[in-house]
Each structure stands twice: as C-alpha cells, then as structure tokens.
Image: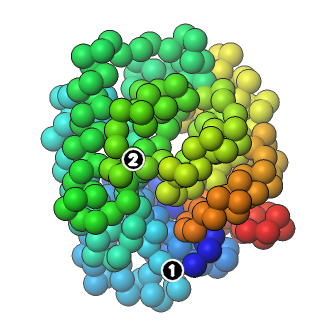
Amino acid sequence: MGIRIGNAPCSWGVEFAGDPRNPPWRQVLRDCAAAGYTGIELGPIGYMPEDPAILFDALEENGLELIGGVVFRPFHDPAAWDDVRDAAWRTCRALAAHGAQHLVLIDSISPRRAPTAGRADAAEQMDRAEWTAFRDRIVQVARLGVEEFGLTVGIHAHAAGFIDFEPELERLLDEVDDRLLKICFDTGHHSYAGFDPVAFLRRHVGRVSYMHFKDIDPKVKADVIARGTGFYEACGQGIFCNLGTGDVDFPAVRRILLEAGFDGWCTVEQDCDPTLDVDPAGDAAVNRAYLRSIGF
C-alpha cells in the first residue's frame, strides 16, 4: 500500500459534533476530495452520519476511504467516564462498519493544563493514584478497540491535556503493552509541547501506527506560550500553519518513515477557527501540493 495521504474534518474547524459553526459534512467530503486526498477521518462522533449506508454512499461518491476516528474526551476526569465510554463505543462501531483501521485516543483539554500548554516545567502533574486511574481508563478504551472491534489504537499527545509532553507520552508507552497501544504521532503537537518531533519519531517509529501531519508557526508558538494563551485562541492566531512554512522538518519525517518501511496513512490536520478569515479548502490543496513536492 505504501504511504497514503488523508485529511480530517478538524482542518475545516470541526472539533465538536454539535457546534453550529461546523460546515456541512458533505461539503467537507467534497472539499477533501477536490484538494487531492484519498482518505478522511470521521471527525467527532455525531458529525458525520452514524448510519453506515448514508456515509458509505457519500464516501464512495467522493472517492474517499474512511481512515479512522478520534475519541477526544476528558480521560483525565473520572466524572466524565460515561461520556468517554459512550463516545468510544460509538466511534468504534462507526469505524468497524466502514473497515477503517485507526482509533485515536486523545485526552482533551483540561482547565488545569490549559494555561501551561507548551511549558512542561510549569505544568501541573498528576499524583501516582490519579495517574494510575487515568492510565487505566485509556487502557480500557484501547482494549475495547483492539479486542472487541479489531482496530489499531494509537495514543495522541495533545496540547493542554495530561498527555501533552514527551515524558508523559513515554511514561504511558512504557506502562502499556505495545500490542494494545500504538502511537498516533502528531508532529505539530509535539513541537507545540516544546520537544523535537523528528528526534522522537526516530526513536519510536517502530511503535507508530498512524501519523498526523501538522506544522507550527514558531513566532505564534513563542507568543502563545509566553502569554499562556488557551489552545483554541492559539488556533485562532494561526499557530497551525500550512505544512512546510513552520518549524517541523517534513523532509526528515519522510526519510524516517521510508527507512522504517512505514506502510499506511498520514493525515493532514490544520486546526482552525471557522469563524475567522480562513480558507480550509485552499489550505488543504496547498498542503497536498507541498507534500507532493517533497515526495509524499
């Protein structure tokens, strides 16, 4: 199969299923295909139809394959566990119905972590008991995906959650069986956190099952970290820029993936605020052209 390039609804500003600012899902499929992608993620469960027949026809009409889906929920909050489990089960069911492979788990933004996104030395840490319970909730959802639905499950570090910084990600990987939990590696979030995505990928590429391609504007990053700007406000300030214009070395990423024999999907994600003066379809086309220019 080789390396294949997809995109995701978050590139159109879709973060939450019920957000009235979301563009129509059929428009996102059309835009994605027109920009030259052959696959797309599900987006937050409930954004695209959960009736497999409706979504199947729309994907086929646009020549798109469903790649995977994300459970972006507060794994850190025990009071939200019922919501996490419901979203996970519905996402697994939707992915399995379309033969999609990748279930991505993300601890969503915590008010305890939001002001210190990108500043590992200042971030609040969980105590041992809280960490253990947090880890075990992630493991439960990973088992659901792997053992009940036959999916490949990857953990995804994300700014302002409790899997944000490289030491937290590596701690989780050390404590969870690699047959159960792989890595969905996001180049941009790793840079946002203040670490070197190329160096991390080189060390851990054997456990990476899925890639998210995201770039970071270094000037915006420096400003939002200095000011303690919230994640969504940072998106509105353009912290996630077009691929190849930020601080992520994508040619080096490509070399590492090819040398490791990586076989699968790399999905472009350029989170944006859809209420601002943005051009998601245009950005998607520019990003696809850039990736082609460096051999993807």
Q: Which residue is mark 1?
A: 64
Name the kind of residue labelled 2 in the image. Answer: Asp
Tell me where residue 147 appears, x and y as whole percent: 22, 59
The percent coordinates of residue 286 (x first, y second) are 76, 64
In this orientation, which residue lies closer to the viewer: 86 or 181?
181
In the rendering, at what x and y percent does residue 125 appear?
Answer: 41, 14
Res. 39 visible in picture: yes
Position of 104 relative to 216 (above/below)? below
Residue at x-position 57% and y-position 18%: 120
Which residue is more in the foreground, 245 or 147?
147
48 or 175: nearer the eye? 175
Front-lying residue, 296 or 48? 296
Residue type indicated by callout 1: Leu
Q: Is residue 77 above or below residue 289?
A: above
Residue 6 in view in this figure: no
- Label 2: few (<14), some (14–19) or many (≥20) C-alpha neighbours in 10 Å: few
Q: Secondary structure at mark 2?
A: loop
Numbered disc 1: secondary structure: loop
Q: How far apart are the two marked residues, 2 and 1, measured between alpha carbons?
A: 30 Å
Crowd band around label 1 with a 10 angstrom C-alpha radius: few (<14), some (14–19), many (20+): many
Where, quadrant-wise, is the C terminus in this rendering?
A: bottom right
In-image side of 153 versus 258 (left or right): left
Q: Is 116 placed above or below 142 here?
A: above
Instruction: Residue at 32%, 68% (x, y): give it.
Output: 95
Q: Position of residue 132 (x, y in %)?
A: 27, 24
**Which residue is found at the position 49% from the left and 38% from the top?**
157
Quadrant into which the N terminus falls: bottom right
| Label placed on residue 56 | none
Q: Which residue is mark 2?
A: 178
Q: In this view, which residue lies farthest toward the left? A: 82
